Amino acid sequence: MEAHEAQFLYDRVANLIAGMIEGGTLRAGDRAPSLRALSSRLGVSLSTVMQAYTALEARGFLEAKPQSGFYVRPRPRSELALPSPARSGSNPRTVRVGGVVDTILAASQQPHMVPLAVAMPDSALLPVKALNRCLARVLSRQPNASIDYCFPPGAEALRRQIALRSAPLGGEVHADDVVITSGATEALAVSLSAVTSAGNVVAVESPVYYLLLQLFERLGLRILEIGTHPELGMNLDALEAAVDRNDVKAVVSVGNFHNPLGSRMPPEHKARLVALLASREIPLIEDDIYGDLHFGDERPELARRFDREGLVLTCSSVSKTLAPGYRVGWVLPGRFHTAVLHAKQVASSATTSATQLAVAEFLAEGGYDRHLRRLRRAYQSQLEQMREAVAASFPQGTRVSRPQGGFVLWVELPGAMDSVRLYEQAREAGVSVMPGTLFSSSGRFRSFLRLSAGHLWDRRSELAIATLGRLAHGLLQGH
């Protein structure tokens, strides 16, 4: 074959794939057709397809992943500005959440509702069949253990698997260092119970996850909100000033892919955070539930890695990655092991035995990392498509977070628009969202809302974002 003919062939292949990307057939995060499949379909050589894919990689359309193939890269577009960084609260506040969250959660479960409010994964993204096989084996091989109480600290097989996965990220961890809980919310609850008492002040990133606010309300804690950057996390200068002015008994931080901002605290900031609190003997409760859902090449470290005093309590679960209904979470409680163990016993006595053993079996089989790679690609693609849809549908001046992991977006609406009113109108139109007021003890963030991209992106999702955009335009004109 002459050189110009070969050039024509690989250009033709490259233009075909580029057209599929620009037309939306292939989207950010999707796997491009394999070299062999495309070679067979187009009747060209493998080397021609490889040349085409290499050219597309150079043009920014594709990226190669070792032993996995080529994937569609997010394309640079008219980039939305990031949400404004939150200011720190001036004084501790008593938390009064009320029943608004319960109402929104109940409404989001209605079958006609497009569920953009609740941060939960679509079951189609989860290894349901593999988990069911693990559960069946556990019930068959360990029938008594599967139905007996599994008292704290929890199933040893699961604690051993968690220790194996945690050690490279957060320093030395043994099975005896792990306490199993009924999900991450209970992990946070028993950690707070172990290190605080009613009336104490707890510092936390702002905006703050609404279920954490409910925990503070139930435990009678006062909250001190610390301003948080949408990419870098908690403002440590503001935190330092706050702990010097107030008798802060604990700090809660989501360093890896904060909910709702999606920010990731850099390693040097985590080291400074841990050192700052250690010098004042203040415990750090680290919520790492989104840590496995990174979009970068490497899984981010835990703040626990920098802990030398045992003052970091790390909480997590498999609710966002594997099985939300299994209610399997855990705490690495550091020096507070005895207090956390007691709090867990008082809170719920035991965690479901069969699901603990099934998760342990799944982790031991070695397929979890492969599952995570697929899940991360799906979440990244879904978030990118949601950001693009918001950019296309919402009024000019809308600002949107740029998550580095997880699957939620934090949206700042223009013109002091009321997100509570937008939530009410969206609910009537069959779309559930979380208004920003739920992410603060003071009702701040009224012009913000949180969107979840945990469900598969489809035509229904596109129409839901378009509906939100239309309603937002109407509210802006009315305002």
Image (tube, rainbow, N blue to C red):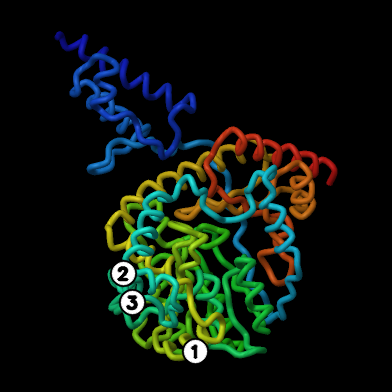
Residue 161 circle label? 2
Q: Position of residue 186 (x, y in %)?
A: 54, 75
- From the viewer's side, name the closer residue of 42 and 151: 151
Q: The residue tagged with tag 2: helix, strand or loop?
A: helix
The location of residue 71, given as percent across then percent down, is: 35, 37
Measured along the vertical axis of the image, is residue 430 above or below residue 53?
below
Mark 1 is on which residue type? His
Query: Contact (CB < 8 A) between labels 2 and 3?
Result: no
Relative to 133, 352 lies left or right = right
**On the image, numbered disc 3 is attached to which residue?**
156
Which disc is residue 342 wearing?
1
Q: Can you name the residue that lies furthest to the right here?
A: 478
Which residue is more in the foreground, 360 or 202? 360
Marked residue nearer the N-terminal end (1 or 3): 3
Bin the neighbour count of mark 2 within 10 Å (Cα to Cα): few under 14, some 14-19, many 20 and up.
some
- Specify the quadrant of the image occupied by residue 288: bottom left
> Which SS class for mark 3?
helix
* Foreground: disc 1 or disc 3: 3
Question: Considering only vertical position in the picture, is 322 above or below 400?
Answer: below
For the residues labelled 1 and 3, the Cα–Cα distance comes to 18 Å
* Residue neighbourhood size for the residue with mark 1, other residues' Cα within 10 Å, grouped as few (<14), some (14–19), many (≥20): some
Could you tell me which residue is drawn at 37 percent across and 24 percent down? Answer: 17
Q: Position of residue 438 (x, y in %)?
A: 69, 63
Name the mark nearer the viewer: 2 or 3: 3
